[in-house]
Image (tube, rainbow, N blue to C red):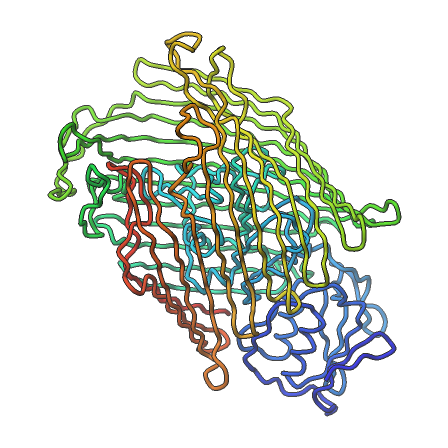
Amino acid sequence: MVTACAAATSQAQTAPATGAIPHEVVQTYQLAPGALDAALSEFAARAGVSITIALGLVQGKTSPGLQGRHGVRDGFARLLSGTGLEAVAGSGGIYTLRVLPVVVPGAAAGEGGALGEVRVTAQKERPGTTEGTGSYTATGPSTTATRLTLTQRETPQSVSVVTRAQMDDRGFQSLEEVALDATGLSTRKLGGGERTQFYMRGFAVNSFLADGVPIDFDSDTQGTASMAMYDRIEILRGSAGLMTGTGNPSGTINLLRKRPTDVPQVSLSGSLGSWSNRRGELDAAGPLNEAGSLRGRAVVAQQDTNTFKKAYRHERQLVYGTLEADIAPRTLLSVGGYFNKEDNPGADWNGLPTRRDGSFYPFDRSTRMTPDWAYWNKRNASVFAELEHEFDNGWRSQLTARVLKSKMDMLGTYLYPLEDSDLFGQGAGAYTYNRTQYSLDAFAKGPLQAFGRKHELVFGASLRQNSDDDGPGGWPLDYAPVVDPMNWDSSAVPRPAFSSAWSRRGHQRQLGAYSTMRLSLADSLSAIIGARLDSYRYDMHTVSGEWSEKSLYRVSDRVTPYFGLVYELDSMHSLYGSWAGVFQPQNYQAASGAMLDPVVGRNLEAGIKGSYMGGRLQASAAVFQINQSNLPLQLPGNECRTQAVVCYAQTGEVRSRGLELEVVGAITPSWKIMTGYTFNRAKHVKDSDVAKAGTPYDQQTPRHLFKLTTSYQLPGAMSKWGIGGSLRTRSETSSWHNVRQGGYTIVDLMLSYQVSPQLDIRLNINNVADRYYYEATGSTQDNNHFGAPRNFLLTANYRF
């Protein structure tokens, strides 16, 4: 039982004092994340030990929870990870909680063996970390929506988190797979299997965050096939202009990488799966000096696999490394980088065609139209540095610099319809892209006292500069095979010679300043007010044979506002509403010859959020409306300044409305769940074609999307076993070419076994019913891609 004493301590009295530290018994624990004091008391009770806790040390702190088999000392260490506290065994087998001391390097012991100068290192607490928690819930705060440090209930927008435990349970190895579980997130294939576009609320996601710093997402060159370096993926639905500046009103995806750890840890995993899928991963982290003031982490992963398509395979490598150094008592320097290689021999640029009426051919799922000599290879290399400082008054500043170089080298084919025939002609292209992104972000945030209340303020500035150096590229000098879709041998087509007459050079620069304030209006009511000021410049020069074109586009002093209200109903529920904007530059010419103003997006959202069982279970419901205006509408040639150019008016408007429901976390300490439902309908409000007003805007976004993922640790003598699975259901989708995919449901299963405290084995079986379906649909000539048949993945993970 737990009792409270007048001396502001609580003590778990679960075992009598014996005069010595009890023999450590290794047991299986399933403790969900939550309040630190409750977690410590529950662990002590189950372990049969006593612990004395000063409530002042644990107030407001959370624990990542505890999963698997652990001894007493190891269990306490994991529960206290990242809190700056430790549990020390004393006489009588009673543990005491205290602040974790660190000796300054070179400090000598004093008389009686007493330590010399002692200080707490500047290592940053990262309460949002999900690694090691075993939880599907991120109980820590997030900065993805506003840069303010807010919990889920304090954030007036919809944010979902896919944790490290969920990625491991599901065997996810790519961001496309993460999207399978994330509420409201769907994917499409753009011109081939190696270009994936993410969609939310009816719009494409074209701006990402890397550890909170904006980056442009380029599906042509950037790889998303390895999740080994990430701790969690945070997904903000709705306009993210306050953080990204430019983009669509869909939202953003924040990729948060793994960090060095306080204590040494090494894990080695290997996977075997269908289609000769072989993958290995090594992850090592910990302190690099005796004082623990220098810490590091390295992750190496490699995958080689065939696919269910003929002559199509993936060869992927990732190397990631990072260092953290406490260079002063409150100053932390982080540096690191990664190299990601993705080779895709036999890449299917075209996908499959359909009949002229949009109906599907009865293809085998291994069928491909692309010749065997096609490929799509990517290289990504990034370096980064972060400097953080915490001030005595609770303020914190951070400066981040990041460089990302990405390269794509591809050779592929495409189909085009032949007139009055069910046959297709096949064209080809070979292109090389070289792209570089430079990002710089600086901010400061902290508390303010005004009108007798405590408020929070953040202000910062960012610079993003991109350069494209694409080429050479071109098309075949002599290549014109005729394709009969039902009688086609992709291996029999000879590889042609290609020209190299195409090139493209582009430069983009975006400079922004932003500020957000959380105002405490009353004990239960807060307002979040923010704005961002951006200037944007873009220029491009494209050459194709004897033809060339130059374009220049500028946007100056563009303001993106943000407003939100959060009302705390009680200790578990909050109501919220928000208005968030975003803009997207567009390179289209008006009738006057001037460039069109940017496309503008506005996201209006209201909802309720709940947090239960100390934050271990979270739920939310939201309704939203997005309006995107200033869309380009092509004008007749006689209305343009000159008929030699195409001109546009900016009168188009689209409206997207919907509902989102989500429940995520631990229903019991042994039962985890993540489930979400999305209803979304987007339509044209204004269009140059009057008949188009009121018609659907994007029928490739499913109107109904339901996802459920769950896992359960069996009780008693079966406690080493875990079972789980997922179900995802989506309604019919179609393209403007009348290519339709009916609604479908896919079921996956998972089985795990804890062989020892160090070794666990997991089996994932995907598409158990072997459903035959298209995961992506395009036109009658291309971009139709099968979903994967039934497949399995067996993974063993060993922790040293």
The extreme top residue here reads: 642
**In the image shown, does 680 or 206 lie closer to the viewer?**
680
Q: Position of residue 457 (x, y in %)?
A: 76, 43
Q: Quadrant of residue 18?
A: bottom right
Q: Relative to 740, is 536 on the left or the right?
A: right
Q: Quadrant of residue 63?
A: bottom right
Q: Is residue 515 left or right of residue 555?
A: right
- How many marks the image carries: the answer is 0
List x then y, in percent, for residue 408.
Answer: 37, 36
- Residue 594: percent from left, percent from top: 51, 13
Query: Horizontally, is 619 left or right of 412 in the view?
Result: right
Q: The N terminus appears in which quarter of the rendering?
A: bottom right
At horizontal 44% and vertical 41% (from top left) the residue drawn is: 380
| Above or below 455: residue 135 | below
Q: Image quarter for residue 450?
A: top right
Side of 262 relative to 774 (left or right)? right
